Image: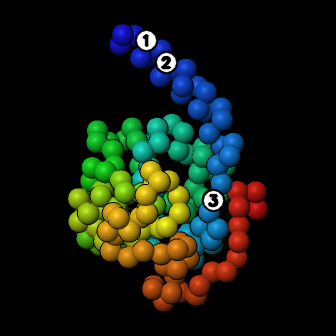
Amino acid sequence: AEEQVRILRKLFDRYYGEVAEEGTFLFPHVADTLGALQAKGLPLGLVTNKPTPFVAPLLEALDIAKYFSVVIGGDDVQNKKPHPDPLLLVAERMGIAPQQMLFVGDSRNDIQAAKAAGCPSVGLTYGYNYGEAIDLSQPDVIYQSINDLLPALGLPHSENQESKND
């Protein structure tokens, strides 16, 4: 049975690697917001449960890899979100305490990981969240759009729309 699982995982990984970028897109304002945060000098990290080998190519295809100084994929830690390990690793690599990070996410796993790590959290109302409203996870703040974060940090609100193909 273990050998079958290994073979199936290998087949899945090969298929996923071929199709991961198809149908993947950025929600509105993501690239502009990341650019504004980076321009303000804020270090940005990304945590995903996606298998690590697929993360960098996907970020490159979406043209957002340039914004992140730390990227943690699902294979980089023993325990994935909602466990705090990935967020704690980001904090360690950035040389800051978890309480100094703001974790922005769109799923209960994101919010639970932030709480477990001691990070303040922002919940976005769109994205992948198992069909439940993000407010049920009780993030510290809820925004309708990622660019709603900018005024809270003293930056102008971004109004530009963008997609993967811009």
User: Residue under circle 1?
Assistant: 4
The C terminus lies in quadrant: bottom right
Q: Looking at the image, do the residues carrying marks 1 and 3 touch, with CB atoms under 8 Å apart? A: no
Query: Which quarter of the picture shows residue 160?
Result: bottom right
* Image position, residue 143 (x, y; %): 48, 75
The answer to which of 109 and 134 lies nearer the viewer is 134
The total of numbered circles placed on residues is 3
Q: Amino acid at mark 2?
A: Leu
Q: CA distance from mark 3 to mark 2?
A: 29 Å
Q: Is residue 150 left or right of residue 85?
A: right
Q: SS of the residue at dot 2? A: helix
- Residue at the image point whose x is 59% and y is 51% from the top: 59
Please report the residue visible at 52 percent of the width from the left and 80 percent of the height from the top.
148
The image shows residue 25, relative to residue 34, as above or below, that is above
User: Looking at numbered disc 1 in the image, what kind of residue is underneath it?
Assistant: Gln
Residue at 69% of width from left, 42% of height from top?
22
- Specify the quadrant of the image occupied by residue 133: bottom left
For the residues marked 1 and 2, what is the alpha-carbon distance in whole angstroms? 6 Å
How many neighbours does mark 2 have within 10 angstroms: few (below 14), some (14-19), or many (20 or more)?
Answer: few
Type of amino acid under label 3: Leu
Residue 18 screen position, x and y as percent:
65, 32
Task: Tell me where residue 32 appears, x and y as whole percent.
Answer: 63, 72
Res 49 quadrant in image: top left
Taking 32 as reference, is 163 above or below it?
above
Residue closer to the observer: 53 or 115: 115
Disc 1 and disc 3: Cα gap in Å? 35 Å
For label 3, the residue is: 26
* Earlier residue among tags 3 and 2: 2
Q: Is residue 77 visible?
A: yes
Color style of the picture: rainbow
Identify residue for label 2.
Answer: 8
